Each structure stands twice: as structure tokens, then as C-alpha cells.
Amino acid sequence: MIQLAKGWSTGTELEPARYPGLINSSVVPYFYLIGILSITTGTVLLIWLGEQITERGIGNGISLLIFAGIIGRLPESMVQLFSTDTMDALNVLILLILFILLISLTVLLTQGVRKVPLQYGKQMVGRKMVQAKSQSIPFKVNGANVMPIIFASSLILFPQTIIQWLSNSSQEWAGWAVIMDFFNPFSQIWYHALFYFVIYTALIVFFAYFYTAIQFNPAELAENLKKYGGFIPGIRPGSHTKEYIEKVLNRITLPGAMFLAGLALAPYIIIKFLDLSSNSGGGSLVYTFGGTSLLIMVGVALETLKQIESQLLMRNYEGFMKKSKIKGRS
């Protein structure tokens, strides 16, 4: 139903008129019904496959299928990149260096954590009082993952759709084209593109804080620590612990959100400065290695490696790296 609504609203998906000669006129009335059944069946099949992968302990099945879909577009983009004469060797080399840099930065963003040390009071073990081992609470720098980019993209797409609809109406006003250009990241007027970048970055930062606030409840966390005898060294339990956790979250969320905004804007900046708008393969390749696609690929790859590593360790293997700090049981 979502796909059907999208097709009717944009006229680009489930529209028989887009395929003249391909669809028999006698089956046009049943086209939408067949389309709904096909999409629903395919979705249910993919969900079932994802659940089967998850049950086998390899990783998150749905995420792996999304990862495979993104990777599957790479060969076509590479062919399109080198089949045109608009790319020279220097630009290809610059693209390769930028991709390696973006992947490295994305790994750092995904793995980055701020560990808050914890201590617990002495506990009675048998007849002795034993000091509990020190622990820590890991707060991820990018705790919201790709959600801020998804929310920001959806929200900034809404005025674009409304303005485009108004500009295509019968009473067309020339000002709509000017307003629409403010929402174009590839605008030839620099301050129009800058407006889009600023709004997009502000939305990502806002939703990063919003999603982090939903995920973490400092008051509940501070209360649980107090209940079980835990405390942060140098911080009094209760309200002081709550304020300290809020301060830590606010400090690490801002750089994480700015880093996330940089990854989301990287495809637009690369395409604009390397002039890849005329090369569909280069543009597609840049979109694959930027924004949500890159975050999903890196996140799924790291999580899958951890799952496989844990499965190997459970079976007394040493894992992938012989010099790894984690060893299997002898």
C-alpha cells in the first residue's frame, strides 16, 4: 500500500503508461492489484529470509539483505564510471582516496565510545568483604546511528515536494523556482546551496539530540546505579550523577552529530567539486560511499564480524587475527 500510494503521488512507479507496449491493455485494470501482490509477497519473503539468517546467529538478517542490496549496485556504477569519457585518471584517483578516507572516518565514528568509570561498594563474598571490580558505562559517540539522517532527509523532502507541486500547478508563479533553488544542494548560486547545507546540518544535529534523549534516560540510569550501590568516582549519587550523565551525553552528541552531517553532505560536496553531475556512474558511486549507505555498510560489516568472531571463539578457535587480544579457550 505504501508503494501504491507513492506511485500514485509521484506518477513514477506503478504507472502502466510508463511502459508502452510492454503491458497489454487488457490487463491494465489488474495491474495495480498484481503490483500490490507482487510487492507484498516479495517483502514477506525477504523478511522471512532475514529472520532465518538471524536465527542462524550470523547477524541481523534484514541488515545483511540491505547491505547486499547496496553492494549489488557497485558493479553497475563502476561500469558506468569507466564507460564514459567525462572521468579522467586524476579524478578517479581522488575518488579512491576520498572513499578510503570516508570509510576510515565512518569506522571511527561507529566504534567511538566515551567510557564513564563506575565503582561499586564492597560486597560480602563468603566470610570476606571484597571490593567489587571497577566497570564503565560506554556511551557511543554516534548513539543515534543513521536515524538523524533519515529523519532530516524526510523532513527536508516535504517542502521540496510541496513547492514542486505548487510550481507545476495551473497558476504558476515564477517565485516558486527561486524558492525551490534554495532546496537544491547543486545550485549554481553558492548561498542557495549553503542554505540547504545549513538547514540539513541543523536538522541532523537536532534529531541526533532528540533520538539520544529518547534512547537514554539519565534519571533512571542514576537511580539504578544508586539502588545497586554503584557510583561514578568523584560524583555524588542521585541528582549529581544524573546531571553528570546529561553533560557527558550533550558533549559527545554534538561532535558525533556534526561528524554525521559531514558524512551526509559528503556526496553533494564531492559531486559538486569534481563535477560528476554528467557522469551517472560516478554520482551513483559517490552516493554509495556517503551518507546512510556507507554507515549501513560499515555498521553491518563490523557487527557481522563480531558475530562470526564470537561463534569462532565459542568453538575454541582463535578468531580471524592470530595476534588478537581475544583468544579462545585452550
Image: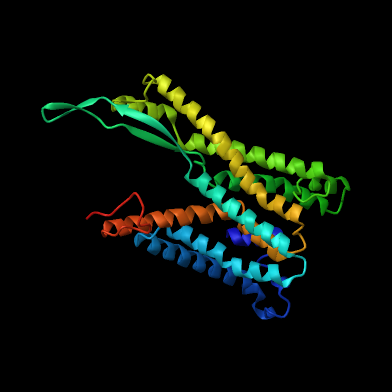
Tell which of 55 and 244 is nearer to you. Answer: 244
Any part of residue 292 in sight? no
User: Would you place residue 224 above or below residue 30 in this image?
Assistant: above
Q: How many numbered badges does the structure rendering display? A: 0
Question: Residue 164, how many percent across, how many down?
Answer: 78, 51
Identify the residue at image location x=58%, y=43%: 148
For the N terminus, which image quadrant? bottom right
Q: Position of residue 50 (x, y in %)?
A: 43, 62
From where the camera sits, is residue 112 visible?
Answer: yes
In the displayed structure, does residue 225 sit left or right of residue 287?
left
| Figure check: 276 above or below 248 | below
Q: Looking at the image, which residue is at 53% across and 54% down?
A: 296
Query: Quick one: quadrant of the C terminus?
Result: bottom left
Q: Position of residue 240 (x, y in %)?
A: 42, 20
Residue extending furthest toward the right: 174
Which quadrant of the figure has residue 39? bottom right
In the rendered image, the vertical position of residue 18 relative to residue 96, given as above or below? below
Q: Does 118 sit above or below residue 22?
A: above
- Observer-nearest of 299 and 117: 117
Front residue of this view, candidates 227 and 237: 237
Q: How is the image coloured?
A: rainbow
Q: Answer left or right for 107 relative to 123.
A: right
Residue 284, position in %: x, y? 66, 62
Please, which residue is most extreme toward the left here? 127
Residue 204 vs residue 186: left or right?
Answer: left
Which residue is at a point 31% across and 31% down the rendered structure image?
134
Please identify the quarter of the rendering in which residue 89 is found.
bottom right
